[in-house]
Amino acid sequence: MSPDTQQEINELVEEFSFLGDWEERYRYLIDLGQALPPLHENEKTDLNKVKGCTSRVWLHIDPPENGKFVFRADSDAHIVKGLAALLVRLYSGRVAEDIADIDAREILARIGLSEHLSPQRSNGLNAMISRIRREAGVKT
C-alpha cells in the first residue's frame, strides 16, 4: 500500500477516535453521507445499482485516469449513504494495487462501527466492497 494511502486511512481512523460512543460515530457517518455529492438522476440506473443491499444504493465508476479509479455513490438511506461515503473516501482516486491492499472491514472495526452494523447493512457493505474491488479488477 502506498504511504499516502496508509496516511489517509490513519487520518480517517483518527477522526473517528475523537468521537465518544457509537451513536456519535453514527452521527458522523450520517454527516459524511450528507456531504457526499448526489449522483445525477441519469446515473441512478440498474447498471449502477448495487445488488445485495436492502436500501437502494448506486455506485458509479468514472473511467480510470492515469490508472486511478474514481467511485461516486448515492443511497436513499442515511447510514448506508454514510457507509458509501466512507468507501468512496477509502477507494476513490487509487490504483488497483492500493484498492487490493485496503481492507475496509478491518478499518470499520478500527473505527468502532463494524460491530454496530445490522446484518442487512453488513451485507450491503460487503456488496459495495465486492463491486468496487471487481470494477478495479481485484479479486474479492
Image: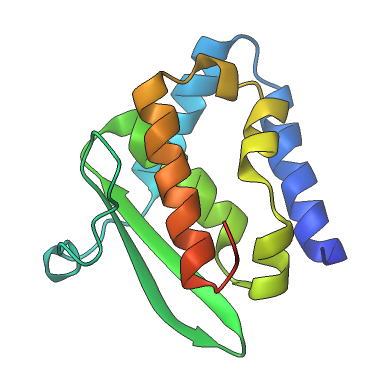
Q: Nearer the viewer, residue 18 or 64?
A: 64
User: Is residue 43 depicted above or below 118 in this figure?
Assistant: below
**Residue 24 visible in the shown view:** yes
What residue occupies the far right of the structure in this picture? 3
Tell me what residue is drawn at x 69 percent, y 41 percent.
12
Q: Nearer the viewer, residue 139 or 74?
A: 139
Percent of width and height locating residue 33:
39, 41
**How many marks are shown on the rendered structure?**
0
**Residue 30 visible in the shown view:** no
Tell me what residue is drawn at x 73 percent, y 24 percent.
17
In the picture, measured across the screen, residue 72 lies left or right of residue 69, that is left
Q: Nearer the viewer, residue 82 or 18?
A: 82
In the picture, measured across the screen, residue 75 lies left or right of residue 13, that is left
What residue occupies the far front of the structure in this picture? 139
User: Is residue 3 depicted above or below 35 in this figure?
Assistant: below
Residue 120, image quadrant: top left
Percent of width and height locating residue 3:
87, 63
Tell me what residue is drawn at x 30 percent, y 32 percent.
78
Residue 140, image quadrant: bottom right
User: Is residue 107 depicted above or below 137 in this figure?
Assistant: above
Percent of width and height locating residue 19:
65, 19
Tell me what residue is drawn at x 55 percent, y 74 percent.
137
Percent of width and height locating residue 57:
27, 47
Q: How is the image coloured?
A: rainbow
Q: Nearer the viewer, residue 24 or 103?
A: 103
* The N terminus, quarter of image: bottom right
